[in-house]
Image: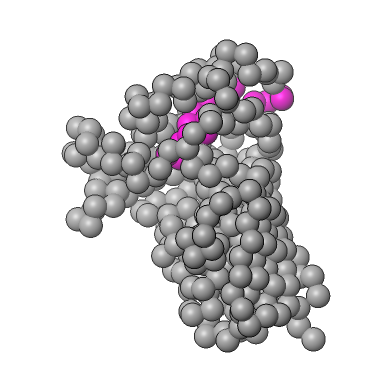
Amino acid sequence: MSARSASVEAQAKLNLRLCVLAREAEGYHQLETLFIRIELADSVRVSTDTKARHLVCEGLDLPPQQNLAYRAAEAFLEASGWDTGFEIRIEKRIPSGGGLGGGSADAGAVLRALNALAPTPLASDALMTLALRLGADVPFLATDAPFALGWGRGERLLALRPLPAREVMLALPPFGVATKAAFGWFADTAAGRAGRAPAPLSLDALDRWDAVAALAVNDLEEVVTARHPAIATCVANLAGAGARIARMSGSGSTAFGIFDRRPSLSTEGFPTGTRLVPSRTTTSVASVKLLD
């Protein structure tokens, strides 16, 4: 009998580099970004031994139909023609609205789990097309690549050789930042209105941490920290603690530091309510485990 349930750790991501490029006629900005996965993860379990469609998400108060993982499951069943129900259980650890891809990681995990369970799995190209419909981060988080270069809206991905694992310190302010708002703020700037072409990027510069650190940038950081100076304080504190890279991830609000050794940090000097969460970058992606 084939398996009816699967579990997977939905790992968060960081953007080591995020360049916002020319704006499309539809209003979307093209991107160039370096994704890397970290150990911080939500636990996701998917079961298909039911006719109902159900989601339980511990740690996030959101109607199931608005949850990206639920929408991923519905989209997968429609695309694959699989006549089944599903139950999704998620234990949240990745904060929402933090630029760590929490919802996208859950959606990517659900797509991977269902593809492992499906009697007729989707081809990788079809799975990526489906993932892109759900969000720009979902294609990367539906792959088994721990480190990748992405272009466009996230649909063009080049898996890169994993970098050696490094210590990560996440500084989590007590608020989130909406992705749509962050891109709107950027669009109102001179750079956002003019757009820009991608600068030449040598793949040889992406195989070691010192070279990646020299390329680390986040075009959204300036406009977001102008409205949320607490994020700038977090970035500055991580840099002051000796981080090899200290940046805001994605559209915020999380600031991260990449360290050669785990730093000894307290929340003293950080904005009130900020949590410090240690993690590590990964050299592999958590596999889907078939349960029965």
Q: In which quarter of the image is the C terminus?
A: bottom right
Work out whether residue 161 can be spotted: no
- Where 91 sits versus 179, above or below? below
Front residue of 4/30: it is 4
Tell me which corner region of the image, top left, top right, bottom left or bottom right, holds residue 208.
Answer: top right
Q: How is the image coloured?
A: one colour
Which quadrant of the view contains residue 251?
Answer: top left
Q: In this view, does 49 lie above or below 276?
A: below
Q: Is residue 271 left or right of residue 267?
A: left
Residue 161 x %, y %: 60, 48
Q: Give the range drawn in magenta.
A: 243-262
Q: Which residue is painted at 44% across and 50% down in the image?
A: 150
Residue for point 61% across, 78% down: 52
The residue shown at (76%, 78%) is 3
Would you say 79 lies left or right of 263 here?
Answer: left
**Image label count:** 0
Residue 287, percent across and down? 71, 60
Is residue 106 visible from the viewing direction of this image? yes
For the residue pair 239 and 278, the one nearer the viewer reads as: 278
16 or 83, nearer to the observer: 83
Q: Residue 252 colored magenta?
A: yes
- Where residue 186 appears, x then y in whole percent? 29, 36
What residue do we see at 57% from left, 25% from top?
A: 273
- Left or right: where 117 falls relative to 222: right
Q: Where is 289 relative to 150, above or below?
A: below
Q: In which quarter of the image is the N terminus?
A: bottom right
* Residue 96 spot, x, y in % from top left: 53, 44
